[in-house]
Image: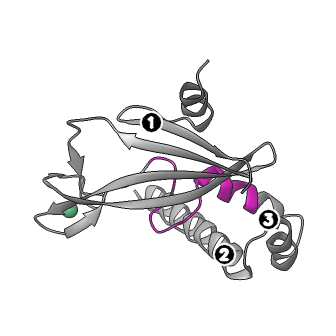
Amino acid sequence: MRDKDLYAQILGIKSPWQVSGVELALSEGEVTVHVEQEEGVQHCCPTCGEVSPGYDSRKRKWRHLDTCQYKTILLADVPRVKCKEHGVVTVSVPWAEPGSGFTAMFEALVIDWLKEASTAAVSRLMGLSWNAIDGIMQRAVKRGLSRREELSMTQIG
Ligand SMILES: [Zn+2]
């Protein structure tokens, strides 16, 4: 299996996204996985889901779960669209939440650790700042609360 296919499978990268390359920087102890969108994909506004014309794209990176002892980074050009109603907005990616510098799988690992240890301990263990760990926790709390609201809405209905 080629490295691109291997990473596409373990990261769960599916169409319209694809792994375009994998780079190993031995001296830095880092693996960089380049992800790109297939040609001719229609983009939707992340807020209203309306198909919108492309505007530009921004290079974004996310920390993912380590590959063995190597820090693993996902790198992608994420398109921005110009929605009639919401203006210029970044399309959402399936592996991370908007505004997060970590993949959803990495955030899940941090949340698991937070159940066992303090924010300070998890921050030392993951080599991340206290604020980064706290940000991951805050997003998880927000997700939990929005799920709770959805649940109560169905109960009212
Ligand atoms: Zn919109």
Magenta-drawn stretch contains 19: no
The CA distance from mark 3 to mark 2 is: 10 Å
Q: Residues within 10 Å of mark 2 (few under 14, many from 20)?
A: some
> Which label's residue is closer to the chain start, 3 or 1?
1
Q: Mark 3 against mark 1, which lies toward the viewer?
A: 1
Q: Amino acid at mark 3?
A: Met
Numbered mark located on residue 132 in the image: 2
Mark 2 CB lies closer than 8 A to ligand 1: no
The residue sitting at 72% across, 57% down in the picture is 28
Q: Position of residue 122 (x, y in %)?
A: 83, 70
Which segment did they paint magenta? 94-111
Dot 3: element: helix
Decide if residue 148 is in sight here: yes
Q: Is residue 28 left or right of residue 81?
A: right
Mark 1 CB lies closer than 8 A to ligand 1: no
The residue sitting at 58% across, 22% down in the picture is 2
> Which label's residue is closer to the chain start, 1 or 2?
1
Numbered mark located on residue 126 in the image: 3
- In front of the other: 73 or 96: 73
